[in-house]
């Protein structure tokens, strides 16, 4: 449609399909009719040629014409020639003689004189009529004594038959075009009804109904496959929008929490600094206390900023310093460091899955791969979290070992288990460090938020809820994911908590 003006081009797919079908059907009918018309004309002319070549003027006619007693001197008998034949004679010198045989209206336009090279014998030719628009079919025939005869038949019947067939073909083409436009429009409208429904669904979605879906999803049709692709696109778009909303909510909450956490030490710093400036005669003891509080708040703010920087660093560039790590020694060092920070707590080291009634058990060396400093920080955060949020005297245990990932062991999702890291492949071998406490556990609501930044669950150890930054578990889960592993929590109210760090075996 490049040559069609833009304003005349059909804009609707339905109109284009109907026009294309109409044009193709009409052209097909006309081509078939033209082919039939050509074949019919050729066949009719062939019949005329057969009649011409089968007819020969009787020999006595040549003698009568030579003797001067031809048809012009006496009427021919009725049985001599069929009524539609015409026979014209040329003498030996090639001149057309006035004598002719046959009757009827009209005559062919013949040459008044012919040579021996013209009008070869036995080859039919078409010549125009002397009067009118008709044509004649003629064939030359040699006679005795150098005479020649030209036998002619009119093509009026052929012209009439082909004319009628031509008008019939045009009528059939017009009827076909009209029928295709009417019936094709209905068929196309019915065929495009599923596509129309997809269009209406898209319009409803653009108007704000985001939960709409295409209903025609048969994989056996093009529209059905389009509906499947359309629904898949909608699902991905809705998922992306939900993720964006969640990310925006988490970012707003993160900014609010970070501002709140930073505002508290900044307010303290500002207050004590103003106190020192406003009271230059402050006693040495109170001045020392103000300096200590300024230093504590500055240290708290510094640790908070360092934690935020570490989270951003882990999210942008996962750790690359991998090496062999003895997880058993790492657990022993973490327990020793925890005893210094929390002298009133006792933490046992046991094989993975062991209980107190089983005794200490035999500890096997478990060698994993990763950054030992970051893994030590994960264990330190887990132990500090357990010591902070459980009542005094609660039994704490660190387990070390290996397992195959699954819902019943670890590394996979199941009801009552929480993690922000993706699950490990089912059946994959993983090295594990888990921190288990017999404390009051967490509610499902708190368990779902325990890995969020700045979230602090209610403390059962008597430590104020505002202590700490609420970033320890978020940092631990980020380190676990950077190592290709997973940090997960199994807990129920009244049954304690089990934080489990899983590292894929063979990670390098």
Image (tube, rainbow, N blue to C red):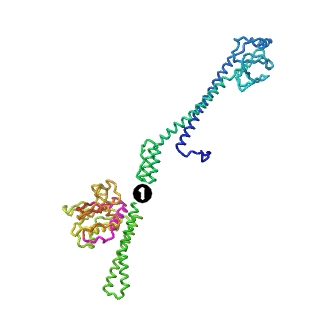
Stretch in magenta: 462-490
Q: In the shown orientation, is residue 186 left or right of residue 42?
A: left
The verdict on residue 297 being magenta is: no
Report which quarter residue 290 is drawn in.
bottom left
Image quarter of the N terminus? top right
Q: Please name whichever residue, 220 or 157, is drawn nearer the observer in this view of the structure.
A: 157
The verdict on residue 475 being magenta is: yes
Image quarter of the C terminus? bottom left
Report which quarter residue 167 is drawn in.
top right
How far across and how far down the image is residue 222, in percent? 46, 43
- 404 is higher (above) or lower (below) than 186: below
- 397 is higher (above) or lower (below) than 85: below
Residue under label 1, please give it.
Answer: 241
Q: In the shown orientation, is residue 35 left or right of residue 58?
A: left
Q: Please name whichever residue, 285 or 484, is drawn nearer the observer in this view of the structure.
A: 285
Query: Residue, x 36% and y 87% (percent of image)?
Result: 280
Q: In the shown orientation, is residue 396 left or right of residue 251?
A: left
How far across and how far down the image is residue 456, in percent? 31, 67
Look at the image and tell me whether residue 399 can be seen. Answer: no
- 106 is higher (above) or lower (below) than 232: above
Direction bottom: furthest residue: 281
How far across and how far down the image is residue 389, in percent? 26, 68
Report which quarter residue 334 is drawn in.
bottom left
Look at the image and tell me whether residue 266 can be seen. Answer: yes
The image shows a total of numbered marks equal to 1
Q: Secondary structure at mark 1?
A: helix
Query: Residue, x 71% and y 25% (percent of image)?
Result: 135
- 155 is higher (above) or lower (below) than 275: above
How far across and how far down the image is residue 79, in percent? 69, 11
**Pointer 1 local density, CA inside 10 Å: few below 14, some 14–19, many at least 20:** few
Q: Please name whichever residue, 234 or 361, is drawn nearer the observer in this view of the structure.
A: 234
């Amino acid at each position: 449609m490049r040559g069609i003006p833009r304003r005349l081009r059909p804009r609707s797919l339905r109109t284009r399909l109907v026009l294309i079908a109409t044009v193709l059907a009409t052209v097909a009918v006309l081509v078939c009719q033209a082919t039939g018309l050509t074949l019919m004309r050729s066949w009719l002319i062939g019949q005329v040629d057969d009649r011409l070549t089968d007819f020969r003027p009787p020999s006595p006619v040549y003698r009568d014409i030579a003797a001067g007693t031809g048809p012009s001197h006496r009427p021919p008998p009725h049985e001599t020639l069929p009524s539609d034949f015409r026979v014209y004679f040329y003498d030996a010198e090639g001149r057309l003689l006035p004598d002719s045989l046959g009757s009827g209206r009209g005559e062919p336009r013949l040459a008044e004189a012919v040579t021996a090279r013209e009008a070869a014998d036995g080859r039919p030719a078409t010549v125009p009529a002397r009067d009118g628009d008709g044509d004649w079919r003629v064939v030359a025939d040699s006679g005795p004594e150098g005479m020649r005869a030209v036998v002619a038949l009119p093509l009026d019947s052929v012209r009439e038959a082909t004319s009628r067939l031509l008008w019939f073909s045009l009528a059939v083409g017009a009827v076909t075009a009209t029928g295709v436009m009417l019936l094709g429009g209905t068929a196309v409208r019915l065929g495009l009804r599923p596509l129309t429904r997809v269009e209406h669904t898209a319009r409803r979605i653009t108007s704000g109904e985001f939960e709409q879906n295409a209903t025609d999803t048969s994989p056996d049709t093009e529209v059905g496959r389009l509906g499947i692709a359309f629904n898949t696109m909608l699902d991905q778009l809705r998922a992306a929008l939900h993720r964006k909303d969640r990310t925006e909510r988490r970012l707003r909450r993160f900014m609010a929490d970070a501002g709140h956490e930073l505002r508290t030490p900044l307010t303290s710093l500002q207050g004590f600094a103003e106190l020192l400036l406003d009271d230059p005669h402050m006693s040495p003891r109170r001045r020392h206390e103000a300096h200590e509080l300024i230093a504590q708040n500055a240290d708290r703010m510094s640790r908070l900023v360092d934690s935020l920087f570490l989270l951003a660093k882990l999210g942008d560039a996962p750790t690359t310093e991998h090496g062999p790590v003895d997880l058993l020694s790492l657990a022993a060092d973490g327990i020793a460091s925890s005893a210094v920070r929390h002298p009133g707590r006792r933490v046992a080291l046991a094989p993975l899955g062991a209980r107190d009634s089983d005794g200490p058990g035999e500890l096997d060396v478990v060698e994993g791969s990763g950054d030992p400093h970051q893994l030590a920080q994960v264990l330190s955060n887990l132990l500090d979290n357990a010591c902070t949020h459980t009542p005094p005297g609660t039994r704490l245990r660190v387990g070390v070992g290996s397992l195959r990932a699954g819902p019943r062991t670890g590394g996979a999702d199941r009801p009552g288990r929480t993690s922000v890291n993706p699950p490990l492949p089912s059946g994959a071998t993983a090295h594990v460090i888990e921190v288990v406490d017999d404390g009051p556990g967490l509610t499902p609501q708190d368990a779902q938020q325990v890995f969020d930044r700045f979230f602090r669950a209610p403390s059962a150890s008597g430590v104020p809820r505002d202590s700490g930054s609420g970033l320890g578990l978020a940092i631990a889960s980020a380190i676990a994911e950077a190592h290709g592993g997973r940090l997960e929590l199994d807990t129920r109210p009244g049954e304690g908590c089990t934080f489990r760090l899983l590292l894929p075996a063979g990670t390098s």
